[in-house]
Image (cartoon, grey):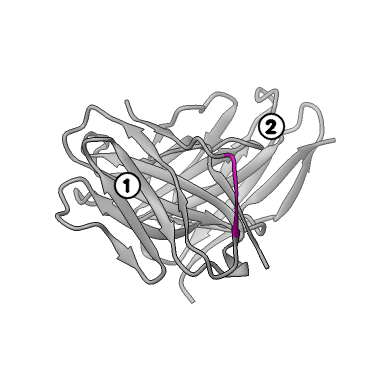
Amino acid sequence: DGGITQSPKYLFRKEGQNVTLSCEQNLNHDAMYWYRQDPGQGLRLIYYSQIVNDFQKGDIAEGYSVSREKKESFPLTVTSAQKNPTAFYLCASSETSGRLRNIQYFGAGTRLSVL
Amino acid sequence: AQKITQTQPGMFVQEKEAVTLDCTYDTSDPSYGLFWYKQPSSGEMIFLIYQGSYDQQNATEGRYSLNFQKARKSANLVISASQLGDSAMYFCAMRGLNTGTASKLTFGTGTRLQVTL
């Protein structure tokens, strides 16, 4: 089954701790994305990557870091600099092409809470 | 810059009835794509339907259709013959051509649809 796997489903962070959210895809997509979703709001882009070893900041990158060492994997680290990390985090992937009809496919999300 | 506005925070519809979820957008890109996603309580975002700004016909996918009015900058989602399983959050999103090869999407705040018996 092709798809995107996010883990863990629930994550708790202590004060001053860095935590890493996992995202793996087997769709052979070049592009991957991380979004943050707060209650009553839409998704906001944190980081995205169009190719291995390259990534760009999205709209709300402060307090987050990513790496893209493998095509299948795009982990997100929520650092201690992120003062309000409680949110639902969604990972997505897509092909890279000039076509507008580039569908993003999403994982099931990770819910992060602060202890 | 792009902006998506969904003005209906919540909607109710009776089973088997049709419902329209509103979406208006703003962009300076001459070419753009509009997307609708469904988010059930489980959290995953499910792609429903796509409309290109230069498509001649309104998009349809099964019970989903998109009422695209370019002059009004609106892309409303119509769900026909609603089912209990349609109860979810629905998000409108868009991508402009100037976002490059990556499919960077701008999302609205969503509409929560509740289907009743």
Q: Where the C terminus of chain B falls, by quadrant?
A: bottom right
Spot occupied by residue B52 in the image (x, y as percentages of width and height): 23, 50
Furthest toward the bottom, the residue is: A1
Q: Cβ–Cβ below 8 Å for labels 1 and 2?
A: no
Q: Main secondary structure of the magenta part?
A: strand
Spot occupied by residue A62 in the image (x, y as percentages of width and height): 55, 23
Q: Residue at x 22, y 34 (%)?
A: B98
Residue A10 left/right relative to A104: right
Spot occupied by residue B55 in the image (x, y as percentages of width and height): 17, 53
Instruction: Tell me: residue B58, above or below residue A76.
Output: below
Instruction: Tell me: residue A86, above or below residue A97.
Output: above
Within 10 Å of disc 2 (Cα), the crowding (few <14, some 14-19, many 20+) is many
Write down the residue under mark 2: A85
Give the residue type at disc 2.
Pro
Which of A23/B60 is in front?
B60
Give the residue type at disc 1.
Leu
Residue A13 left/right relative to B40: right
Q: Where the N terminus of chain B falls, by quadrant?
A: top left
Query: Which label lies toward us, 1 or 2?
Result: 1
The answer to whether residue A98 is magenta is no
Q: Secondary structure at mark 1?
A: strand
Q: Secondary structure at mark 2?
A: loop
Magenta span: B9-13
Label of residue B34 in the image: 1
Q: Is residue A96 visible?
A: no
